[in-house]
Amino acid sequence: MTKRARVKRLAAMLCSLTVFTLSGCWNYRKVDKMTTVAGIAIDKGEDGQIKLTVEMVDGSGGQDAMSVGSSRISLSGKTMFDIVRRMITESGNRLYWAHAKSIILSEEIARDGAAKIIDWYVRDSETRADIHILVSGEETAEEVLSSDGNSGEPLSYKIDDILKNENSVSNSPVIEIFDFADTINTPGISSLLPMVYSSENKEAKTASIRGSAVFDIDRMLGRIDAPKTKFVLYLRDEIKGGILTLGGYNQPPGISLEIFKNKTKVEPVLVDGQVEIRVKTRTVTAVDEVQENVDYYTAKGRAEIERMAEDMLVKGMENAIEIAQKRYKQDIFGFGDRIHKKMPKAWKSLEPDWDEEFSRLKVSVQAKVEIKRTASTKKPIKTEEEES
């Protein structure tokens, strides 16, 4: 099946998502007769089956009467809907899906094609489209969902909290099922999903979200680590906050710049009859940390720091573009979508073989960093060695 045929098939499969999202009409159920689902993990089972693990809210509490705990059940089957219905025999109640916070796909499932797995969730009238979708960085998705730390609180709620605060870090994209389906249906942009891992802290396992998974339509091709994903988000104009680090511990200048505002403009242009992309990004920051004796309190000193930050951003974005063009040949930045909107005639000739066209696309990057203020008006702390 050609890529264009796959897109059309998946568009038809997922078009019902918008209908259910806008309808806002949910089947009425008595709450005390249902079990609330917090999150979902999907893996491949034995003999070509699907294995579904559901995290459920346990209202009986964990450590005290006021706490909310969680429990999990797993079942395998040939289709998602078959598994969901049979879970009634395990939970004792019908499952209530409207409050589910996250769907975690195993990498094996993601590489095989995510759309056919999430089709049931998209179609069902009792589910919602504002659920986050992620790919497990561990061997299975169940392994991540089973990491519940010491509190007993549903891990899916913790994942939701992490994603809501991701703009303070900007190391992963934040994608809901609606976003994922919309990207599949949009020409000139490839999907990107966050990676979630099971991490250990003080002998307790929990979730850690970092980096991204690159998709060709709905099939995962590979990963991009967290530091490089930050520059991908710059190119997608999805930076809301976070930190720009120049150097580090014993690596001058050792400066942390807090991002207050960022705007990235992507402009398609014609040069000698060829489409090119020009990227310009403007970032407003403040100096929040200085490990070395660096002049940041004068106009000249701040200008030098701004120049270093601009160079670092340009190199980082150029590296992200090279990864997308050479390693994956996937337009995860949406350059094609911009061409489609601004130059529809040019796009008509580029679209049939966009993956190859994108891999050869000339992209120029410019960065402007402004330091508006610092966290302190004091000069950097000097040691005796530096003063002598």
Image (cartoon, rainbow, N blue to C red):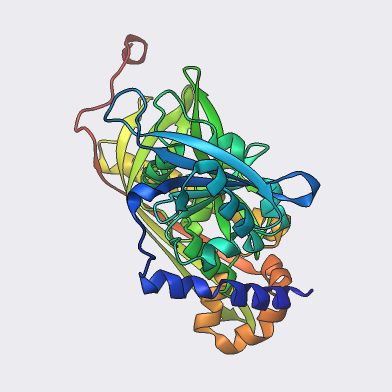
Q: Is residue 110 above or below residue 274?
A: above
Q: Residue at x 46, y 41 (%)?
A: 56
Instruction: Let me know if residue 295 appears in the view.
Output: no
Q: Which of 274/385 is in front?
A: 274
Q: Residue at x 72, y 45 (%)?
A: 45
Q: Residue 295 appears at what percent x and percent y?
A: 32, 33
Q: Residue at x 40, y 41 (%)?
A: 157
Quadrant where the C terminus sits is top left
Q: Which of 327/131 is in front?
A: 131
Instruction: Let me know if residue 64 appears in the view.
Output: yes
Residue 356 as seen in the image, left or right of residue 228: right
Q: Which of 227/54 is in front?
A: 54
Residue 68 as seen in the image, left or right of residue 343: left
Q: In the orientation shown, which residue stands out farthest toward the bottom?
A: 345
Q: Residue 334 appears at what percent x and percent y?
A: 55, 68
Q: Residue 322 appears at what percent x and percent y?
A: 65, 55
Q: Is residue 180 above or below residue 87?
A: below
Q: In the orientation shown, which residue stands out farthest toward the left?
A: 377
